[in-house]
Image (tube, helix red, strand yellow):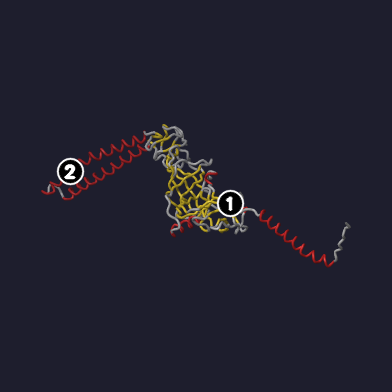
Amino acid sequence: MAAVTVRMTPEMLKRLSFPALAGAALLALTACEKKQEQAAPPPQQVGYVVLHTQTVPLRAELAGRTSAYRVSDVRPQVAGIIQKRLFEEGAMVQAGQLLYQIDPAPYEAAYEQAQGTLANAEANLISLKSKAERYGELVKVEGVSKQDYDDARAAYQQGEATIIADKAAVKAAKVNLDYTRITAPISGRIGRSSITEGALVTADQTTALATITQLDPIYVDITQSSMEMTSLKRRLVSGGLGKADAQVTLKLEDGTAYATPGTLKFAEVSVDQESGAVTLRAMFPNPQEMLLPGMYVRTMVEQGVMSDAILAPQQGVSRNPKSEPIALVVTADNKVEQRPLTVDRTVDDKWLVTNGLKDGDRLIVEGSLKVKAGQTVTPVEVNLSAKAAPAGGVPTGGAPTSGNGK
């Protein structure tokens, strides 16, 4: 059978090409849409924590220096030669303990002389009294003149005055004699002696013989800027803060914590003109004498209590290009919402947020750099405390520096 060749005219090709091309295009579009549906990624998974209000004590980390509870210079109150030094340098001494003995000989002599003068005056007074009484009887019968009686009575009164003066002289001599025994005015640790046995001391000398320092308890003088204190007082007055217990803790120079907390005693009523700071004074027990005067320490001072406070984990707070603190939260429909924040300070490993977050908010703490505002996400609640122990310390705040990119 012979093959039949069909010649396609331009008219026939035109009629066939339009339906074929349309069908091919439709098939290609359908396949592309199915491919896109298959390739669409699921919503990004983020980790969040639920925020709750709580009562937070506000602490300020402030620098301070220790100072002795009591300091007393040991000074002579009479002149003389030091016969004995009766203490060990650096030892503990008790109030009233004998420290130095000044040669008492001249003061013993003066005391005895004063006693003799008093005894003589007392004996003379007996005679004067008897004479005055006798003249008193005689003047009644005109046995003596009125003038003689007045003279006898005046002599007796002068004798009484002499007794008073002589008794005072005896007392002064006894005081000076007692001052030859130089005793400790307070209890504490005594330093080195500035003089040796055989040295001459005087009552008005400027150099102390030794210094006694009481170290238990001990003071810590703390400085805080007047601006911070004014802000704190304003918030206390307005009711934004409740009053704290005025408890103070401190860290030693090597960073270790001091075991026993102290108590805030008072604040100065004036501001230092050079530094613009106010001095606070706290008192700490110091039975082991670990704290010595002049040591530099860091203190944590409880300055108020904030109720209904929001503490946001640091990894949930970042900054925008304007260096303003922001946070990302998951809304009820699982969309990301960006919030501007107002932060006060850090409390342990969290930010104290005063504006921008509320109770019940779901704060994104993991995957925040992988999402943006308005994006639908898959939220998963995380337990941060189970992942890492809280950071120690209580920094005094500042703007957050970065977000979390997990």
Q: From this viewpoint, is residue 136 visible? A: yes
Q: In x, y percent, where is residue 259?
A: 46, 40
Which residue in the structure is indicated by mark 1? 46
Residue found at the far front of this picture: 1
Residue that mark 2 sits on? 131
Q: Residue at x 48, y 50 (%)?
A: 59
**Mark 2 Cα shell of 10 Å, populated few (<14), some (14-19), many (≥20):** some
Whether residue 402 is visible here, answered yes or no, is: no
The residue nearer to you, when weighing 281 against 94, is 281
* Quadrant of the drawing holding the N terminus: bottom right
Query: Residue drawn at (65%, 55%), measured in percent from left and top?
Result: 40
Q: Considering the numbered disc 1 on the image, is that residue within a helix, a strand or a loop?
A: strand
| Disc nearest the viewer among 1 and 2 | 1
The location of residue 383, given as percent across then percent down, is: 53, 47
Q: CA distance from mark 1 to mark 2?
A: 116 Å
Query: Outermost residue toward the right?
Result: 2
Amino acid type shown at disc 2: Lys
